[in-house]
Image: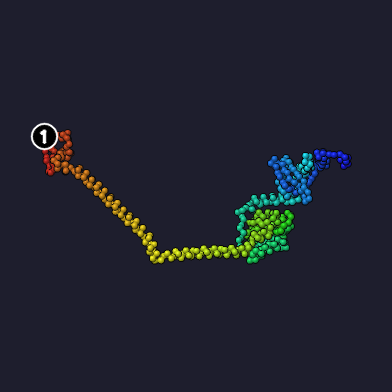
């Protein structure tokens, strides 16, 4: 080091950064690094920027688009990954980062990938559909708890239920919650509760733990048992930041077992206050209705009934009289019009009566043999016998000229 940095030499910042860049990049041309992804920031160009960290330190990381295209998973904060790349120093700022060439899941990262694949498969089958969800009972008589009989989660649930409503019963369905035997044990207790219809709602869960500890609640057989349960199920696995696939299949998800107990148990004092409030509302409503009915009944006395009947009858009678007068007046007018019309027709008929014309001195002449009316000399000829019909009688004559 003494040869590289002589004691009396004064360096500029750029010179130091340049020396360090050459030294670091030469020393770490290829490195394999394992850490947890944090502050993941994908770029619109396809480059990915994030931080790799462990419990004590962190390092900036970048994966350029052409390398990121080969990834088989989508990076997320919290994933544990194993990266291969080179250490790069950004000389103007004196900072360094790892430029990643390849990246794969490590440790819990593999579990997260497995869970994500399983979740997608079960979701495609419709196990998480909202239409399958059941409403929790408002006033459950009995709450079933599928969990470890020795865990703190059970103690918390029992304590909260008893504090909120001691009238609500609790049935414990003890099961194994960790390890290879846990999933079948959980399923068996869910099926037992359903087979005998032993409770109104089921809390299925456990206290916090590592991702591996919570795996039984993401097993496919457990998720299917929860989805098929006829009893409403509340999933309560781990702490608020934890999750399991059972959360998606359950009718409700609670962040903790204690929260599940609060979700399922109505507070007795609140229920009583609510009932008393409703009782007061119904009493007031019934009392008001009764008073209204009394006033209505009072108005149905004989005197009031007659008055009300008259008040209804009088307008109808008035309308009837008015209609009768209108009808009579209309009929009278129509009769007058008819009489005038008949008189007019009679006059026309009388004016057309041939006897009236004959009485004025006219006569009608017709051929005796044919009976044809003679209107002009062309209708007869000399020697023809004709009849002359005056107003009275009949004259027979022979045409001479």
SS at badge 1? loop
Q: Position of residue 154 (x, y in %)?
A: 70, 62
Q: Quadrant of the N terminus?
A: top right
Q: Is residue 87 at least partly visible in the picture? A: yes
Q: Position of residue 385 (x, y in %)?
A: 13, 37
In the rendered image, the vertical position of residue 272 relative to residue 90, given as above or below: below
Q: Quadrant of the C terminus?
A: top left
Left or right of 6 in this view: 303: left
The colour scheme used to paint the residues is rainbow
At x 65%, y 55%, the residue is 249
Which residue is under mark 1? Answer: 400
At x 70%, y 51%, the residue is 115
Q: Position of residue 221 (x, y in %)?
A: 68, 56
Name which quarter of the figure residue 361 lies in. top left
Question: How many dots with numbers?
Answer: 1
Q: Nearer the viewer, residue 79 or 367?
A: 79
Q: Position of residue 397 (x, y in %)?
A: 11, 38
């Amino acid at each position: 080091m003494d040869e590289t940095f002589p004691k009396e030499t004064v360096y500029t910042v750029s010179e130091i950064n340049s020396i360090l860049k050459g030294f670091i990049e030469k020393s770490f041309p290829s490195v394999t690094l394992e850490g947890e992804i944090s502050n993941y920031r994908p770029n619109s160009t396809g480059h990915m920027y994030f931080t790799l960290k462990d419990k004590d330190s962190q390092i900036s990381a970048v994966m350029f688009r052409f390398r990121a295209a080969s990834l088989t998973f989508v990076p997320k904060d919290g994933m544990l990954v194993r990266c291969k790349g080179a250490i790069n120093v950004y000389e103007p700022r004196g900072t360094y980062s790892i430029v990643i060439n390849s990246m794969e899941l490590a440790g819990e990262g593999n579990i997260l990938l497995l869970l994500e694949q399983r979740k997608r498969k079960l979701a495609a089958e419709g196990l998480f559909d909202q239409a399958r969800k059941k409403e929790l009972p408002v006033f459950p008589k009995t709450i079933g708890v599928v969990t470890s009989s020795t865990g703190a989660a059970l103690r918390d649930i029992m304590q909260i239920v008893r504090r909120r409503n001691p009238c609500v019963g609790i049935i414990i369905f003890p099961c194994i919650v960790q390890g290879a035997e846990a999933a079948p044990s959980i399923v068996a207790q869910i099926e037992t509760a359903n087979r005998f219809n032993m409770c109104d709602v089921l809390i299925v869960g456990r206290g916090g733990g590592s991702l591996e500890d919570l795996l039984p609640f993401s097993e496919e057989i457990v998720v299917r048992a929860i989805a098929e349960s006829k009893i409403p199920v509340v999933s309560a696995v781990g702490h608020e930041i934890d999750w399991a696939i059972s959360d998606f299949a359950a009718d409700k998800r609670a962040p903790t077992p204690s929260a599940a107990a609060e979700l399922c148990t109505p507070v007795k004092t609140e229920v009583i206050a609510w009932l008393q409030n409703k009782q007061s509302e119904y009493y007031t409503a019934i009392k008001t209705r009764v008073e209204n009915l009394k006033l209505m009944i009072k108005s149905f006395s004989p005197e009031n009934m007659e008055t009300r009947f008259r008040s209804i009858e009088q307008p109808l009678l008035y309308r009837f009289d008015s209609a009768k007068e209108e009808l009579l007046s209309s009929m009278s007018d129509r009769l007058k019009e008819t009489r005038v019309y008949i008189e007019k027709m009679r006059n026309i008929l009388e004016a057309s009566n041939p006897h009236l014309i004959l009485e004025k001195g006219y006569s009608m002449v017709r051929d005796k043999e044919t009976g044809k009316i003679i209107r002009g000399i062309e209708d007869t000829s000399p020697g023809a016998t004709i009849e002359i019909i005056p107003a009275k009688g009949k004259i027979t004559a022979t045409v001479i000229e």
